[in-house]
Image (tube, grey):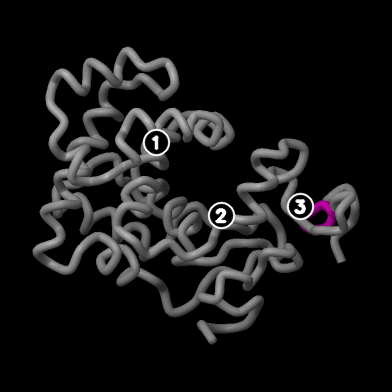
Amino acid sequence: MPSDDGSDSGLVRGPDGLVRPVWAVGDPLLSTYYDTEWGMPVRDEQGLFERLSLEAFQSGLSWATILRKRPGFRDAFDGFDPDRVAAYDARDVARLMADARIVRNLRKIEAAVTNARATVALRADGGLPDLLWSFRPERTPEPRHQAEVPTTSPESVALAKELKRRGFVFVGPTTMFALMEAVGIVDTHVVGSHRRGTSGVWPAAGPGAP
């Protein structure tokens, strides 16, 4: 059982009795995200394109910053509809660069447009959901301490390489592993967390999927 200060596993039992990693306590926004969204399966194109885009925008920043800005991102990027974003032109890029609700980074904004076009093009060969989920590993990590949670995997390296081949940018192995964690392709909840094994994709512990 994790200690209240998280010294044994990097987990903390909150006042509500639920066990979470240290990063998911203290900030209600992060706690809610952890409890209800992070690691739950996302299998639709628009949802995956949004997560892919936000992971790229998060590079070099805290995830809390991205979560606080997510309503602004969704509004500015037309709900991350790949068809609409793929049609953006220089005027749209200028509009986005002037929008204080989002992360105003030209390379990342242009990457989102590039990736929207790559997402649309990928429909002719199965689509983004099929491609991303095809890199689900045979086993998922079973970290017993937060320090044991990996930041890359052979599958994330291969996924990054394939996405780049398909015309995507800002899709390095670390970013892709974070995406795989976020959308349920792997389960890196520390064993003992109340979220471990709740996605329906992986068991709480033990080899392979149910």
In the image, farthest residue toward the bottom:
210
Q: Name the quadrant containing residue 103.
A: top left
Whole-percent x, y for residue 43 in the image:
37, 65
Using the numbered discs, state the Cα–Cα distance from disc 1 to disc 3 in whole angstroms. Answer: 33 Å
Whole-percent x, y for residue 116 in the image:
21, 44
Q: Which residue is mark 3?
A: 10
Q: Secondary structure at mark 1?
A: helix
Please say if the residues under marks 1 and 3 sit with CB atoms less than 8 Å apart: no
Task: Point out which mark residue 32 bears.
Answer: none
- Which dot, 1 or 2, sits closer to the camera? 1
Camera sees residue 201 = yes
Q: Name the quadrant containing residue 204.
A: bottom right
- Which dot, 2 or 3, sits closer to the camera? 2
The vertical placement of 12 against 42, above or below, is above
Count of numbered circles on the image: 3
Q: The N terminus lies in which quarter of the figure?
A: bottom right
Q: The C terminus lies in which quarter of the figure?
A: bottom right
